[in-house]
């Protein structure tokens, strides 16, 4: 699902926005490219210390949209910089092998946001 360009973007630090919604109100929080852990080329694991509003939204609507970018990676038509929009379904993990792996890597977390990716589209 993810392209070489996507993996190249992850090599550069940049913000990742995570958008959720329920009850007609969106919530957006951010993390960093370097915190994303890719599993099986269609799953993203994100360490979560806060993200309470996202967690509340996912209880009612498990859809998420993530955006990420890196100016250092060439995009379409020689454009300086590129980004991606990721659409998928999310859940918070508080146990299991993914949680244990992420807790060992990021001791500050209270849970792990697992994003099951349905679409990854390059924007620029």
Image (cartoon, grey):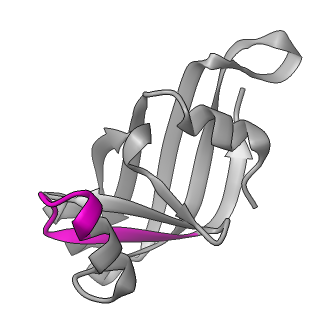
- Picture quarter with the C terminus: top right
Q: Residue at x 28, y 78 (%)?
A: 100
Determine the residue located farthest toward the front in the rendered image. 104
Q: Quadrant of residue 72?
A: top right
Q: Is residue 71 toward the left or the right of residue 50 in the image?
A: right
Q: Which percent across, then down, holds residue 37?
A: 47, 57
Q: Residue at x 55, y 30 (%)?
A: 69
Can residue 24 be seen by looking at this rendering? no
Can residue 62 be seen by looking at this rendering? yes
Determine the residue located farthest toward the bottom in the rendered image. 96
Relative to residue 51, is residue 78 depicted above or below? above
For the residue pair 87 and 116, the one nearer the viewer reads as 116
Relative to residue 48, is residue 80 depicted above or below? above
Q: Which percent across, then down, holds residue 64?
A: 45, 62
Relative to residue 83, is residue 3 depicted above or below? below
Q: Which percent across, then down, holds residue 45?
A: 42, 64
Q: Is residue 8 toward the left or the right of residue 43 in the image?
A: right
Whether residue 72 is in magenta: the answer is: no
For the residue pair 69 and 72, the one nearer the viewer reads as 72
Q: Residue at x 41, y 71 (%)?
A: 114
- Picture quarter with the N terminus: bottom right
Q: Quadrant of residue 50?
A: bottom left
Whether residue 104 is in magenta: the answer is: yes
Q: Which percent across, then down, holds residue 2?
A: 72, 54
For the residue pair 33 and 87, the one nearer the viewer reads as 33
Region rendered in magenta = 103-116
């Amino acid at each position: 699902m993810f392209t070489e360009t996507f993996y190249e973007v992850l090599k550069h630090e940049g913000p990742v926005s995570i958008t959720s919604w329920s009850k007609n109100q969106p919530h957006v929080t951010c993390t960093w490219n370097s915190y994303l852990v890719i599993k099986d080329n269609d799953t993203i694991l994100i360490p979560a210390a806060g993200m309470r509003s996202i967690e509340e939204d996912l209880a009612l609507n498990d859809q998420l949209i993530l955006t990420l970018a890196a100016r250092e990676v060439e995009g379409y038509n020689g454009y300086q910089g590129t980004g991606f929009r990721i659409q998928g379904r999310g859940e918070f993990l508080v146990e299991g092998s993914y949680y244990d792996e992420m807790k060992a890597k990021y001791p500050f977390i209270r849970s792990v946001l697992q994003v099951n990716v349905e679409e990854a589209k390059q924007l620029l």
